[in-house]
Amino acid sequence: MLRDYVYTLDPSLLEHTLSRFDVLIPAEQHKHALIQFQVLTPDSFIWKFLIDGVVYYLYAEDYIQGLKFVHDEINHYAVENSQIEFVKAKHQKQFDDTDPARNTAVYKEPEDYDEMKLYAVDSGYDFVFLCTSNEDASKVFFNN
């Protein structure tokens, strides 16, 4: 489960989750890096990556109200005036087949789930989303 990253810092959890999105992770270690990780609430998390010169955000949360909510949350942590775009999930699931829906006693399906499922993967209690950002990749490190 991706949220275990908080306790283990195990990069294989990230690798497994990222592999479920339509993104190519270069084999060369110097072409991808975790830039930042933040626990936003006890049930929501965000990671910032640099992958092959592109900035990505990975967002996980247990209860999602809809795709606009996710976009707004990620955009809140992205660099001001940057544009973010969702990356498609490789496989879509019906809401009732997702881990969050099965692991919760009551979970109202978001009204826009037919669109949301194109971009969501599940991980234990959480839905997870990946976005690209048009941020200047040369300015994501401390030395800039």
Image (cartoon, rainbow, N blue to C red):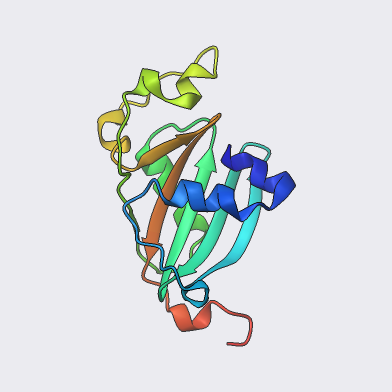
Q: Position of residue 57 (x, y in %)?
A: 47, 58
The single residue placed furthest to the left in the displayed view is 114
Q: Is residue 69 left or right of residue 139?
A: left
**Residue appearing at x 46%, y 33% in the figure:** 64
Residue at image point 58% right, 79% down:
141
State the residue in front, 95 or 1: 1
In the image, is residue 135 above or below residue 100? below
Q: Is residue 78 left or right of residue 120?
A: right
Percent position of residue 33, x then y: 54, 69
Q: Is residue 79 visible?
A: no
Give the quadrant of the C terminus. Answer: bottom right
Residue at x 39%, y 68% (from the top left corner):
82
As drawn, which residue projects farthest toward the right?
7
Quadrant in which the N terminus appears: top right
| Residue at the spot 38% in from the left edge and 18% down from the top edge | 96
Residue 103, position in %: x, y? 54, 19
